[in-house]
């Protein structure tokens, strides 16, 4: 019965898309409204809870001492993880990371990392020996589509509000003591699109993801520069469609930053 209802709703979503309409009444270039709560979790160096439409994620940052990579002995690092908790949706299951979790984490990671918004040299404790590593993990609390952009917003806000822990002479974290904030010079954000019935739309809901032929995510910074792209699903886009999504994605991200400002 449930599958029959879902199939009907997906068919309706496709039919509306062909007419340039969406089931929730939004425009094709319109993101859902969102709210952000900052530093909700006291055991994290920085954290955020984001509600994008009905999609809800919680993110937290923990900063620990680690060893540098051989090819960057004087640079710290970040590590991004995503977990789709079973409580968020009936389709999610407990266990090892799923392909969806791996893809979401990598796309969010790439947008943050490739923006060069963090000066990793400032996270070096001792060249070749010790660095600071910022682990940002985000969790699906409720899923109604577009975990990519919800995770991107939560990750950015969490990192922007993260405190840098003090490190002693033996390269150990001093608990509850900090030296300042993690400095970010840019605010990279993802804008994710899907193609349904030949139409391109931003910030897809769960039903729109189910109806989609293809997905495309664009990461950009506030100066309008593109820092990452990711194509998903089996369908295809034309060159003109890709150019449109890049241009629109940059514009949508700028609007998102304006709305974010009141929460920061």
Image (cartoon, helix red, strand yellow):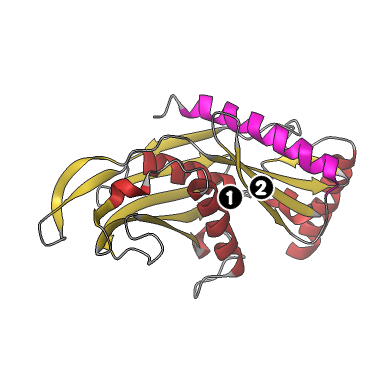
Tell me, yes or no, if residue 135 can be seen here.
no
Q: Is residue 67 left or right of residue 168?
A: right
Q: Is 47 contained in the magenta span?
A: no
Does dot 1 land on a helix, a strand or a loop? helix
The overriding secondary structure of the stretch rendered in magenta is helix
Residue 148 image label: 1
Marks 2 and 1, how far apart in space?
Answer: 8 Å
Residue pictured at 14% horizontal, 49% vertical: 176
- Residue 55 appears at what percent x and percent y? 56, 46
Where residue 234 sits, quadrant-wise, is bottom right
- Residue 34 appears at what percent x and percent y? 53, 34
Q: Is 247 contained in the magenta span?
A: yes
Residue indicated by mark 2: 217
Residue pictured at 11% horizontal, 55% vertical: 168
- Residue 264 appears at what percent x and percent y? 39, 29
Residue pictured at 74% horizontal, 48% vertical: 208
Which tag, 2 or 1, sits closer to the chain's start? Answer: 1
């Amino acid at each position: 019965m449930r599958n029959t209802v879902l199939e009907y709703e997906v068919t309706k979503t496709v039919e509306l898309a062909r007419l340039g309409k969406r089931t929730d009444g939004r425009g094709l270039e319109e993101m859902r409204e969102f709210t952000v709560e900052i530093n909700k979790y006291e055991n994290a160096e920085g954290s955020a809870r984001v509600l994008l439409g009905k999609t809800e994620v919680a993110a937290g940052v923990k900063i620990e001492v680690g060893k540098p990579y051989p090819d960057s002995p004087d640079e710290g690092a970040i590590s991004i993880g995503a977990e789709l908790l079973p409580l968020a949706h009936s389709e999610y299951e407990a266990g090892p990371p799923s392909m969806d979790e791996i893809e979401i984490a990598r796309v969010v990671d790439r947008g943050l990392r490739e923006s060069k918004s963090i000066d990793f040299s400032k996270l070096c404790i001792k060249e070749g020996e010790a660095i600071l590593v910022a682990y940002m993990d985000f969790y699906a609390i409720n899923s109604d589509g577009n975990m990519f952009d919800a995770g991107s917003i939560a990750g950015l806000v969490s990192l922007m509000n993260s405190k840098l822990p003090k490190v002693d002479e033996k390269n150990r974290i001093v608990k509850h003591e900090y030296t300042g904030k993690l400095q970010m010079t840019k605010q990279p954000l993802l804008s994710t699109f899907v193609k349904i019935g030949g139409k391109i739309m931003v910030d897809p809901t769960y039903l729109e993801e189910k109806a989609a032929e293809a997905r495309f995510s664009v990461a950009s910074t506030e100066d309008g520069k593109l820092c990452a792209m990711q194509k998903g699903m089996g369908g295809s886009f034309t060159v003109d469609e890709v150019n449109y999504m890049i241009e629109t994605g940059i514009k949508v991200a700028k609007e998102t930053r304006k709305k974010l400002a009141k929460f920061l």
